[in-house]
Image (tube, rainbow, N blue to C red):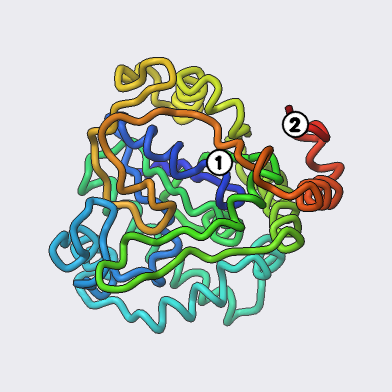
Amino acid sequence: MTTQVLYLAGLGRSGSTLLTRLLGQIEGVCSVGEIHHLWKTGAPRAAADELCGCGETYADCGFWLDRLAAAAQGGGVDLERMRSLQEEVSRIRRIPRLESGGDAAFEAAVEEYAGFWSRLYAELREATGARVILDASKDLGPLFFLDRVEGIEVRVLHLVRDPRGVAFSWSQRKLRPEFVDREVYMNRHGVLDVALRWWYSNLLADRASRRFPHTMRLRYEDFVAEPKAALETICAFADLDGADLSFLDGRSARISRGDHSLSGNPMRFDSGALTIRADMRWHQEMSAAGRWATAALTWPLRRRYAYSWSAR
């Protein structure tokens, strides 16, 4: 049986956690967060000091330990081996070899790593009864790698946001609440770094349409302006027609279904009433120099996505 995967592609801080929290409220959707960051989390070692998206520690939750045991076919997961395989076959710099093919050693590594991911996605589908696995990894290396994974059908949702909003968000200091016994903050990046990341992430997301016949693009600003319309379009795209969106009322949402998401923005732990609104603080709080530099460095790709110079 083929496993349906809806893959969010693009650059972080583009609203993907908000979008996945909403999509995760739909019956038949299994939202797993940034699953290709799996080996960086405490999930494979059932950490007692790190929280799963469900709010329990990985040790108490047990969800990922069971899924990984099944994907590893009853044996333990060799973390060092998995990290080595990930580095070897699913980084951005490996995309040319993934597309054109590599030597025998590279192809053997791809086959080994792809086999694990095929089994893991299938296990997630079977364990949860989901129609769609929602993968919010965003990274483009893993996306191109998924073209090599058998037993899955990938639909790509390219989420894009005004680069000035992205750059401003990456400059903010954000605590990662999943670490229960220490303070850990999300990475921060400067304007030049974010502009370059925005360029190549979105160009590669556009390029992915050549590999994956089912792709669609969604602007963050359009999504938060009309969330129900955006979700209806996504549901049609992901073969989730007839989905119950009653948890949405205009720009308000009721978050009641939890998930076992891996990594992501701190809001993945939020529940209850949620107001959906665009984060446009960059208009007032980002320096004029930062706004100008980001706009200049991301032209003309920014214009392709219909972001004006003022974006007002």
Relative vertical location of residue 122 with respect to residue 89 in this rendering, above or below: above
In what quadrant of the picture does the C terminus appear?
Answer: top right
In what quadrant of the picture does the N terminus appear?
Answer: top left
Q: Which mark is residue 311?
A: 2
Question: What is the quadrant of residue 78 in the picture?
Answer: bottom left
Closer to the eye: label 2 or 1: 2
Residue type highlighted by circle 1: Val
Pick the residue in front: 294 or 213: 294
Residue farthest left in this picture: 60
Q: Which mark is residue 156?
A: 1
Q: CA distance from mark 2 to mark 1?
A: 26 Å
Question: What is the quadrant of residue 104 in the picture?
Answer: bottom right
For the point 65% across and 45% down, the residue is: 285
Pick the residue in front: 6 or 138: 138
Pick the residue in front: 59 or 77: 59
Mark 1 lies on a secondary structure that is: strand
For the point 30% across and 71% down, the residue is: 42
User: Would you say 181 lies left or right of 291 here?
Assistant: left
User: Would you say 296 lies left or right of 97 here?
Assistant: right
Mark 2 lies on a secondary structure that is: loop
For the point 36% across and 69% down, the residue is: 41
Instruction: For label 2, count other residues whose C-alpha is less than 10 Å away and answer few (under 14), some (14-19) or many (20+).
Output: few
Q: Is residue 218 visible?
A: no
